Image (tube, helix red, strand yellow):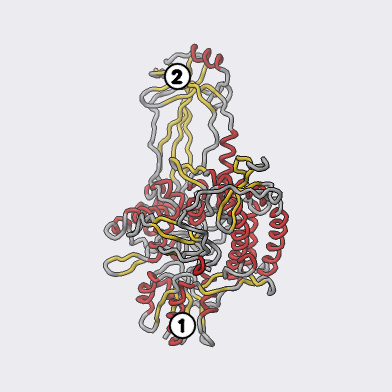
Amino acid sequence: MKLVIVESPSKTKTIKQYLGPEYEVVASKGHVRDIADTGKGRLGLDFNNNLKPIYEIIPAQQPTIKMLNEKVEKADVIYLATDPDREGEAISWHLKEVLHIGNKPVYRIEFNEITEPAIKEAMKTPRNIDMLLVSSQETRKIIDRVIGFRLSSLLKKTVGAASSTSKVSAGRVQSAALKMVTDKEEEIQKFVPEQFFEIEATNSSYTAKLQEPETNKVFLIKNKEEAQNIYASLSPLMTVTNINVKKQLDRSYPPFTTSTLIQSALNKYSINSKRTMMIAQTLYEGIDIDGKNVALITYMRTDSTRMSDVFKNQLVPFIKKNYGDEYLGYAHMQKDTEGVQDAHEAIRPVSLAMVPDSLRNYLKKDQLQIYTLIYQRTIASMMKDATKEITNVTFRSNNYLFMSSFEKYSFLGWHKAFSDKKEEKVFEGKEGSTVEFDKISLNAKETQPPERYTESTLIREMETSGIGRPSTYASTMDTLVGRRYISEEKKKIIPSKQGLLVSEFLHKYFSAIINIEYTAKMEDELDEIAKGKEKEATYVHQFYDNFEKIYEDNKEVIKPIPTGELCPVCGSPMVFKTGKFGQFEACSNYPSCTYIKKTKKDPDLPHIECPKCHEGYLVLKTATKGPKKGKKFYGCSQYPKCDYITTVIPSIKEAK
């Protein structure tokens, strides 16, 4: 028997039907082990053995490992078919390490789409696990563990205490992204608007704006008196002095990457990044069509715009047949961009025969929207550029010139497949003719501050700056929202008070680590490990030594955040602190002054140590959802790290 192990259970049935009865296909259900939460700083690193990570089976995956071992025992050969990226490569390696494979042959296979030809081709070209990719992925995990654990613990003692919540964290990518948001907010708050005046003429069809005397730019008049004098001299009866027509190519877009798919889904349908990636995952793994699981798109985590020659050769006759020979163009691809891994193809449909309209009865509304975006964009990327005519018309009123622009398409090109073109405007007058405008307006305006990020523009900025990778965009946004560091108002991202506090803290003490340039440089260095140009052990040591020096240099100078009150005993500022039993307010002059502000406690709840983790203490809580919503219970103060709950308070003796 030949055993194939994939990640997702939803893939098993489809792949099994393509491979035949001699194969058994089972799922690992994702990661099976992780770096242990033990040792120095709970980092899970062996400091006596070259900082090697100490791995442990994820408790919830024990039944899966047992099942996989039973299958391995009966198998003659094992194929590891986890996802085709670095994370998938690492999962394959972990599976090989924990399963009782012995001397049986083990191969790694990968496919970019779950179709019969792709899977059968993958089975013809098995390979060994790429340990360079594994090293890159595991180095990423070690670095994220060190930064996340070490800085998060400091945040909980300082910012967490001040914000009355322990749910604060830091991370290599999330903190750099948060810095982008808070920097933008700082720009906005510092912005000082300046007044200017604009003059425009309007009629029922179009608007013309006053131009600067020697340029074609809109005249933004800064002096109010000058603006009023010009306005007073104008007549609504104007002469057409010039009509200038020029042709301009409207170039098609390349096919989708993870980033551009997320941006398009947000901009067109307001589907957030997390939801978009969940939908794309289901389209990749397959949907049920008349009792058969059918995959619709290629792998959805990619930074490449490349399409296979086989698929491009299918697009050529498709475009000719459905749109005409004159619409066939060439494959539009992004320019080579630093940091792009180009490991897989772009996101595209697996079959042009699966037309979006034919799937209306099988897909949910948002699934159909995402699939249609992918389908249309893929076709458009191989179609000819559109051509539009830009007509600039100049009008004269006394000695002043006004200009208006009109555009229409002389050739629709790729818009035939992916239509998002603007409404066309046409000017029907001639040079020398007279046009009477309905109204001339003098408008007082102000310069505007920089635009806040939307989720779409923040992800685009992350990609442009080189922080994060296709697999991290959605999870980064989810973390920032989940930690309540940011919120959205009219689609604009606004940092919360806690977000500003966290970002300020990290910038003040750890700006050498938490910044965009450092994070982008680290992504490049992880790529170098994947290429074999950098050694994992050497890089981890260099990073850890550098990090620890910065950490230790700053740890001692970090000061607790003041509460805004003074100590009633000695008059020193009161500060927020955290201790064994959570947050409290104390005098900053400790140990000279030991004053601690008393807080009202639940009289029925003494400070009892959690009998499960022995780190937290029991606190009174109220269920917020489920059948027991509104009911009181006691839970560990270290939740979600510790999930102990009880409805009966044990005695102090029992707890100890």
Name the secondary structure under disc 1: helix
Determine whether the residue tagged by mark 2 lies in a helix, strand or loop.
strand
551 vs 102, nearest the viewer: 551
Give 551 or 629, whichever is nearer the viewer.
Answer: 629
Nearer to me, 622 or 649:
649
* Label 1: how many Cα within 10 Å (few below 14, some 14–19, many 20+): some
Spot occupied by residue 437 in the image (x, y as percentages of width and height): 40, 19
Q: Dot 2, how many residues are within 10 Å of its Cα: few (below 14), some (14-19), or many (20+)?
A: few
In the rendering, which numbered label is found on residue 38? none
Q: Position of residue 322 (x, y in %)?
A: 34, 54
451 relative to 406 in the view: left or right: right
State whether residue 336 appears in this view: no
Quarter occupied by residue 447: top right
Residue 439 falls in image quadrant:
top left
The amino acid sitting under disc 2 is Ser
Residue type, numbered disc 1: Asn
Give above or below for 493 relative to 403. below
Q: Label 1, on which residue?
A: 69
Above or below: residue 21 compared with residue 380: below
- In the rendered structure, the answer to whether residue 544 lies left or right of residue 436 reads right
Q: Position of residue 364 (x, y in %)?
A: 31, 56
Question: What residue is disc 2 on?
Answer: 441
Q: Residue at x 57, y 18 (%)?
A: 223
Instruction: Give the left or right position of residue 374, taking residue 637 as reference.
Output: left
Which one is earlier in the sequence, the residue at label 2 or at label 1? 1
